[in-house]
Amino acid sequence: MMQTLSYLHYKQQRKSMAIESLNEECGVFGIISPKEQVAESIYLGLFALQHRGQESAGIATSDGSKLFKKTDTGLIANVFKNIHASNLKGSLGIGHTRYSTTGSDSKKNAQPLIVRGINGEIALGHNGNLVNTEELKEKFLSEFQIDYKTTADSEVIAHMYANSLGKDWFDRSNYCMRYIKGAFSILIMTKDELIGARDPLGIRPLCLGKKEGSWILSSESSALSHIGADFVREIDNGETVVINKDGIQSSKYNSRSNDHKMCIFEQIYFSRPDSIIDGQLAYESRVKMGESLAKEHSVDADIVVGVPDSAIPAAIGYSNESKIPYTEGLIRNRYVGRTFISPNQKLRELGVKTKFNVLDQVVKDKKIILIDDSIVRGTTTTRVIEMIRDAGAKEVHMRVSSPPITSPCYFGVDMATTSELLANQFSIDDIRKIIGADSLGFLSLEALITSVNSNKNSYCKACFTGDYPMPVQLDFDKFHLEKIKEKN
Ligand code: SF4
């Protein structure tokens, strides 16, 4: 419910709140090669997906008879200090970089996971979040008396695939797709096969690449070019691909393409701007969002400034449309990225000053249009506006290249609880007062949809509408499985 009177109280409270961030889910990257050792290429691919998760990383490989694995907490560069000397042998492997959306960020939850079941030993890396983990454990896995080693929903998917009925991986995957509810783009590795699958709604991305005789599966196409591979295509919603020495085969679960509900935030923010999503470069979608924002919320100003790095394409789009010059007014400290603010609350509280610096001479005495891609709790936005005003800006007009976020995500994005979402609690004008802007405008949902290529994809837009593409448990939090474990 909108509260129109208590925003001043809220504003005071927020002084002690953590810096907000929309935390991405995870990244997966796998290669099967006829002869090359793959660990180093997987390492490079994961590097390109580091933005999708910074809490832990891992690689599992197979030499055709045995699986090898190394996982740990931390960034890819820390986990694999000397990848050349690792014992990750083999011409088949999968890698994972994780942000915890279910389960804590402890070492035991790092992926890939290796489990054994009636279908043999498999390694799994998962991007997404399930909404029926407990049901799967009780209804489908109880007979196997599994000793769960992690508190992540991904382990449940691994055991489902390792123990599902079916003559081949297509049958087994279709069985799993029928019962597993939620978002999952997964890579599975057996001793001699690489398997990729995307849930029936295709909420999280997954794409296929090729380099000479090697096949690659990756969360984002941008990671393919890092190892010199060509983008082949996106994996479809409900599709399973199995790649082995005989080549690649594909099968589709009984889902229609118009069931496609990819997360629209992949277009707005999560994916890298150089990734192809739904057939369109994310950079181009973001420029169009900025152009539409300028059409919907024009204002007289001297310069357009984007919050780096993610809002820069939208700021360029706003400038193109409004003919107001785009200027760099905020510099991001490249060595204090998400890494720095992500895992540790104390460090987060040090604030955005460590992350951004204002170019005082650029903003002084100017009317600024400040573009960001989203407002979650509003803490970062407030502090950035304060910094710009302190540097002498005359006016700060906030423009946001997505609609107000009013509902939390249950499909693998850790954004905030309902009551922490500023737009769930306050009117647009109160948000304007809270963040300290002279004016505030959000992109409309209609304009967002026309900015992305939505020919075959109707997108999940639930954090803007509250209309989830499947039933969700509204009191779910990411430590849900740990709480259940403690209770038992
Ligand atoms: Fe993406 Fe929002 Fe849907 Fe979550 S609720 S999958 S963030 S669009």
Image (cartoon, rainbow, N blue to C red):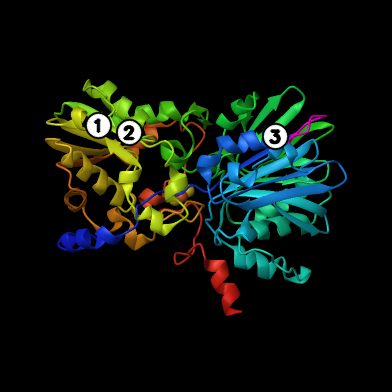
Q: What amino acid does circle 1 point to?
A: Leu
- When asked about the image quadrant of residue 347, the answer is bottom left
The answer for how far apart the CA atoms under marks 3 and 2 are is 33 Å
Write the start and end of the magenta stretch as one range: 32-39
**x and y, in percent, of residue 207 in the image:** 62, 34
Where disc 2 sits, the SS reads strand
Q: What amino acid does circle 2 point to?
A: Ile
The answer for how far apart the CA atoms under marks 1 and 3 are is 40 Å
**x and y, in percent, of residue 205 in the image:** 56, 40
Looking at the picture, tell me which residue is in the foreground, 178 or 21: 21
- Magenta residues: mostly which secondary structure? loop
| The disc label shown at residue 40, or none | 3
Left or right: where 307 falls relative to 2 = right
Q: Are marks 1 and 2 in contact (CB under 8 Å)?
A: yes
The mark nearer the N terminus, 3 or 2, is: 3
| Classed neighbour count for the residue bearing mark 1: other residues with Cα under 10 Å, few (<14), some (14–19), many (≥20) | some
* Quarter that holds the N terminus: bottom left
| Classed neighbour count for the residue bearing mark 3: other residues with Cα under 10 Å, few (<14), some (14–19), many (≥20) | some
**x and y, in percent, of residue 28 in the image:** 62, 42
**x and y, in percent, of residue 78 in the image:** 59, 45
Q: Which residue is mark 2?
A: 331
The mark nearer the N terminus, 1 or 2, is: 2
- When asked about the image quadrant of residue 328, the answer is top left
Looking at the picture, tell me which residue is in the foreground, 179 or 359: 359
| The disc label shown at residue 374, or none | none
| The disc label shown at residue 359, or none | 1
Q: Is residue 270 above or below residue 365?
A: below
Please name the residue shown 57% across and 43% down the image. Answer: 202
Where disc 1 sits, the SS reads loop
| Classed neighbour count for the residue bearing mark 2: other residues with Cα under 10 Å, few (<14), some (14–19), many (≥20) | some
The answer for how far apart the CA atoms under marks 1 and 2 are is 7 Å
